[in-house]
Image: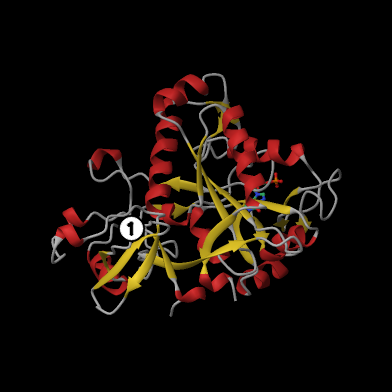
């Protein structure tokens, strides 16, 4: 169904090179594109090969691209196994809730693939990202702010970046208050550090899908509710949320219009140089104490980032490499400033 002005646009969620495609009838007629490119659909008359051109391209000649249906079928046949596994709650970074994302290692002695394939709700076989129909969107002044989701591997510096942004303008930025079932400590107040609720209520809320994510730690539950995001947005603040990347697809609604930023580590050489004196709460440490980075932490961070990018890269609106913290912060700040005024391509389903 063509969108406004009779034009239909799609966002490519994978890379395509017709010269690598054995099925295309004529390679010269193909249109190559990269993940994230916006394409204008010129014809969908053929069930297998659509005609498209790059958005804004003045050249009227269209090229062939695989149709959604055809590409989905091909992807389903050679779908890589999913390598992620959720972790139990074990540590806490200085602000907000922890992000529990870890690679699961196989027994090193078996010399098999280092990463185990886990069947879990993280693995959604129906998920074969090909194209998404999009339309231009610009936030109106009277509209709520878009939810900003930050994702990245443990130790990449996401929490520092988030904290810097928060303190730069506490009137403008906000974070969610998590729920917990543990007892309130004397210096804590309800609704500030946590929203304290009973186990029974927590379990009911889980059943009713009220949580974006939750975990268990020392016999208590902790979690972030959807309503806690709503309450930040209702204060007319930009809500900063950091979650595991697999939760992002559940947040991609008309209500939140999430803008997803991936904080990516630099090369391992730069990690060694820039994090020499820094500390990490390692995902391998159940005590959650901060210790100097080890070589294994760097390797785990890089590997975890690669997996995140290959599995969820199609959901990222912006990638910021955190090499030098000050540079990354400036880039983040600039991204936020533009978000409030620029036009973005968003799923058509967010617009009506
Ligand atoms: P504490 O009880 O000492 O405040 O926190 C214990 C643990 O709960 C910490 O390791 C922290 O990371 C975790 N935690 C706090 N909030 C959340 C949350 O919203 N979700 C999850 N999954 N864990 C949380």
Q: Position of residue 165 (x, y in %)?
A: 69, 39
Q: Position of residue 25 (x, y in %)?
A: 13, 67
Residue sitting at x 61%, y 70%: 254
Disc 1: CA contacts within 10 A as few (<14), some (14-19) or many (>=20)? few
Q: Position of residue 195 (x, y in %)?
A: 77, 57
**Camera sees residue 179:** yes
Q: Position of residue 213 (x, y in %)?
A: 59, 59
From this view, report whether residue 70 is shown above or below residue 334: below
Residue behind label 1 places its C-beta within 8 angstroms of ligand 1? no
Q: Is residue 209 left or right of residue 196?
A: left
Q: Callout 1: helix, strand or loop?
A: loop
Q: In the figure, residue 19 lies in which quadrant?
A: bottom left
Residue sitting at x 58%, y 39%: 158
Which quadrant of the rendered structure holds the C terminus? bottom right
Q: Front-most of 179 and 199?
A: 179
Q: Front-most of 328 and 183?
A: 328
Which quadrant of the rendered structure holds the N terminus? bottom left
Q: How many marks?
A: 1
From this view, report whether residue 277 is shown above or below residue 248: above
Q: Is residue 122 left or right of residue 176?
A: left
**Camera sees residue 218:** no
Q: Front-most of 350 and 87?
A: 350
Q: Is residue 56 left or right of residue 200?
A: left
Q: Is residue 226 left or right of residue 196?
A: left
Indicate the colouring scheme. secondary structure
Residue sitting at x 57%, y 52%: 243
Reading the image, the residue beneath label 1 is 59
Residue sitting at x 51%, y 47%: 318
């Amino acid at each position: 169904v063509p969108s406004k002005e009779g034009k239909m646009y799609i966002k490519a969620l994978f890379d395509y090179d017709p010269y690598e495609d054995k099925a295309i009838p004529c390679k010269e007629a193909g249109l190559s594109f990269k993940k994230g490119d916006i394409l204008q659909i010129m014809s969908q008359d053929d069930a297998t090969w659509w005609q498209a051109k790059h958005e804004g391209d003045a050249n009227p000649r269209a090229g062939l691209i695989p149709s959604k249906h055809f590409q989905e079928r091909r992807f389903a046949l050679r779908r890589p196994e999913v390598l992620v596994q959720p972790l139990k709650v074990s540590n806490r970074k200085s602000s907000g809730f922890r992000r529990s994302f870890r690679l699961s290692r196989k027994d090193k002695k078996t010399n098999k693939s280092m990463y185990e394939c886990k069947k879990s709700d993280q693995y959604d076989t129906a998920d074969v990202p090909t194209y998404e129909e999009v339309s231009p969107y610009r936030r109106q002044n009277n509209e709520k702010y878009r939810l900003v989701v930050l994702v990245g591997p443990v130790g990449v510096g996401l929490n520092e970046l988030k904290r810097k942004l928060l303190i730069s303008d506490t009137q403008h930025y906000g974070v969610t208050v998590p729920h917990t079932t543990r007892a309130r400590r004397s210096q804590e107040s309800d609704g500030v550090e946590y929203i304290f609720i009973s186990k029974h209520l927590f379990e009911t809320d889980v059943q009713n899908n009220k949580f974006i994510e939750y975990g268990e730690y020392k016999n208590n539950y902790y979690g972030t509710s959807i309503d806690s995001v709503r309450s930040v947005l209702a204060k007319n603040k930009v809500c900063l949320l950091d979650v595991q990347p697999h939760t992002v697809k559940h947040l991609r609604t008309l209500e939140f219009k999430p803008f997803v930023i991936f904080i990516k580590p630099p090369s391992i050489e730069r990690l060694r140089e820039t994090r020499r004196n820094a500390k990490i709460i390692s995902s391998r440490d159940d005590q959650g104490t901060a210790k100097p980075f080890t070589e294994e932490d760097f390797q785990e961070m890089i590997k975890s980032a690669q997996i995140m990018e290959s599995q969820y890269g199609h959901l990222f609106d912006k990638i910021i490499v955190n090499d030098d913290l000050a540079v990354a912060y400036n880039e983040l700040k600039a991204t936020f400033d533009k978000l409030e005024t620029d036009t973005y391509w968003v799923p058509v389903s967010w617009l009506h």
